[in-house]
Image (spheres, helix red, strand yellow):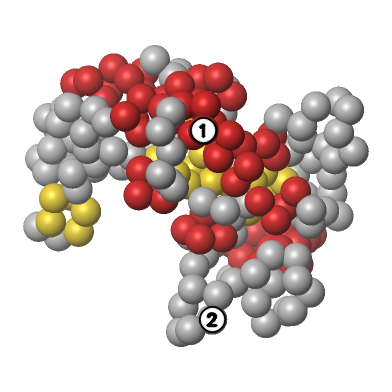
Amino acid sequence: MWEGFAQRYGNNSLVVGADLRNELRKAGGVAPTWGTGDLSTDWAAAATTCGNRILAFSPTWLIVVEGLNYANDLKDAFLHPIVLDIPDRLVYSAHDYSWQQPEVHNYVSFREYLDTMWGGLATASTSDARKAVPLWVGEFGENTDSRWWGWILRYLKERKFGFSYWAVDGEQRLGQEESFGLLEMDYATVRDEWKLTDLQSLQ
């Protein structure tokens, strides 16, 4: 499938990359792994193979690789990083929501947790043996002005991560409200002005 997309859109300047798979998680009793070498479950191995096959057709594309556990867990990438055939094409992507967090009581603990799970991949110091890799926060969202919301905004500002917010639209599926949406179900009315102002402060 990805080879077909790469062939079709490889020369389209509006397409800059491929996010290989959304929110890996346990399914059918089988949990994905990272760097284990078990090709039946090893997402890092599969993403490497897929990324290289895409780059064979579209060598300028970015290859976006999400973490495990609904894209919240990239900690094994510290020990088992993905290495593609063409350098400087890899982008890790994380998702973060309030329910994915352990019980933390202050911002310092929150920041340390995210750095351990994924944020630290992009902030390696020059003294580290590993190389810092670009990281994109592919999803985060909230429907209340919560403590978590304030913390994630502060974290994104401090780390200067690029992001996409979930979601713009106010309709999750036909007739069902998307409470995290920036817009109401009419796709025109801003749902929460405070949220829009907060997100604009990150830009």
The C terminus lies in which quarter of the figure? top left
Residue at (55% x, 40% y) in the render: 113
Quadrant location of residue 45? bottom right
For mark 2, does the 10 Å Cα neighbourhood hold few (<14), some (14 to 19), or many (20 or more) residues?
few
Front residue of 150 and 19: 150
Secondary structure of the residue carrying numbered label 1: helix
Residue 50 visible (yes or no): no
Secondary structure of the residue carrying numbered label 2: loop
Q: In this view, does 85 lie to the left or right of 181?
A: right
Q: Mark 2 points at which residue?
A: 30
What x and y, as percent, mark residue 50? Answer: 70, 65
Front residue of 29 and 1: 29
What x and y, as percent, mark residue 135? Answer: 63, 38
What x and y, as percent, mark residue 117? Answer: 60, 46
What x and y, as percent, mark residue 13? Answer: 61, 39
Q: Hey, what amino acid is under mark 1? A: Ser
Q: Is residue 11 left or right of residue 52?
A: left
Relative height, residue 90 to residue 54 (above, below): above
Which numbered marker is on residue 192?
none
For mark 1, does the 10 Å Cα neighbourhood hold few (<14), some (14 to 19), or many (20 or more) residues?
few
Which numbered marker is on residue 109?
1
Q: Is residue 165 left or right of residue 134?
A: left
Residue at (58% x, 34% y) in the render: 112
Residue at (13% x, 50% y) in the render: 177
Q: Hey, what amino acid is under mark 2? A: Val
Relative height, residue 59 to residue 2 (above, below): above
